Image (cartoon, grey):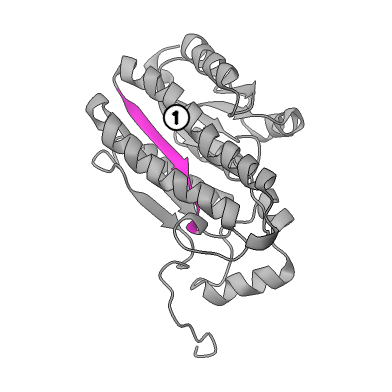
Amino acid sequence: MAETDGPVAIVTGGASGIGLATCRVLLAQGWRIVCVDRDAKAISEARPQLPLDGRVWFAEGDVTDEARVAEIVANAKSSVGRIKGLVTCAGIARDTPFLETTVDDFRRINEVNVVGTFIISREVAKAMRASGGGAIVTIASVSGLLGNIGRSAYGASKGAVVNLTRVMATELARYGIRVNSVAPGPVETPMVAAVHTPAMRDVWHERLLMDRYGTPSEIGEAVAFLLDEKRSAYITGQVLAVDGGFLAAGVIDKARG
C-alpha cells in the first residue's frame, strides 16, 4: 500500500478505552491503524466501532510477550506498511493502599505497564530506525508525576514510563524518532469505572479545576498532536498532562464562583 494512503500507527490496548478512542481520532486524521489488544472479546466488540474501509488491522497479543510483539511488528511492516507511529495504551491499574499491596500485584502491574511498554517500543523503534524515523507516544498518568493515594504499584509503573520516555527520546533522536508521553488525569474509561468508587470520584473532583473527568477522545487528540510530524516536529522528551488542571491546582475553594 502506498504512503499516500496514510501513515501507519500501532496502538496497543487499542480495543477499548483510551486506546480505542485514539484509534478513532487517528483514523479521522488520515492514519492507518494496527490495533493490538490481548483481549479477543474486546477486539470483537471494537471491530464494528471502527470504519470498515480497509484502514484498520487487528492483532491479538500481550505486550509482555516478546516473541508475539516481534511477530506483530514484523507482520505490520510486511502487510500494512512503514510504521510511523506507536501509541502504548496497554495497561492495568489497581487502587490498593500501600500496606495492602501484594508483591504479586506490584510485579504484575509493572510487568504490563513498564516492561510491556519497553518491549513494544524497542521493537517498533528498531523498525523506525531502519525506515527513517517516526514518533512514539507513551501513556503515563498524573499518578506517575505525584503521589496519589492507593497508587503505589500503578504510580511506580507510570513514573517508570515517564523516565523511560525521556531515555528513549535521548537515545532515539539521532534516528529521527521522537518520543513523548501523555499523562492523563481521571478519564471515563472501563478501567477507571472499575477502580474509582463514588468516594474516590469526590476526592478527584475536589482537585480538578475543570470539575469533570476527561473523555478518552480528549486524550486521543493530544496523542494525535504528538504523533503529527508537522504540528509537533520539534517536540521530544516531553510529558503532556491532559488532566483538567489537576497538576496545576493548589488550594481550591470551589464555593467561590
Give the side of residue 87 with respect to residue 195, left or right.
left
Estimate the x, y position of residue 39 in percent, counting from the top left.
71, 31
Q: Name the residue located 50 percent from the left edge and 53 percent from the top edge.
A: 141
Pick whichever, 196 or 108, lies toward us: 108
**Amino acid under label 1?**
Ser
Estimate the x, y position of residue 158 in percent, counting from the top left.
50, 49
Q: Main secondary structure of the magenta part?
A: strand
Q: Check the image and name the residue furthest to the top.
A: 78
Q: Check the image and name the residue furthest to the right.
A: 41
Q: Name the residue located 48 percent from the left edge and 61 percent from the top edge.
A: 243
Quadrant showing the N terminus: top left
In the image, the segment drawn in magenta is 133-142
Give the side of residue 23 with respect to residue 6, left or right.
right
**Rendered view: 138 above or below 212:** above
Estimate the x, y position of residue 140 in percent, counting from the top left.
48, 48
Q: Is residue 90 visible?
A: no
> Circle 1 is placed at which residue position?
121
Residues packed near mark 1 inside 10 Å, few (<14), some (14 to 19) or many (20 plus): many
Q: Is residue 137 magenta?
A: yes
Pick whichever, 36 or 200, lies toward us: 200
Q: Secondary structure at mark 1?
A: helix
Q: Name the residue located 41 percent from the left edge and 45 percent from the top edge.
A: 181
| Res 202 quadrant in image | bottom right
**Rendered view: 41 above or below 251:** above
Pick whichever, 182 or 102, lies toward us: 102
Q: Name the residue located 52 percent from the left edge and 34 percent from the top edge.
A: 115
**Rendered view: 20 above or below 36:** below
Q: Is residue 180 magenta?
A: no
Give the side of residue 33 with respect to residue 102, left or right.
left
Q: Is residue 149 visible?
A: yes
Estimate the x, y position of residue 23 in percent, counting from the top left.
55, 36
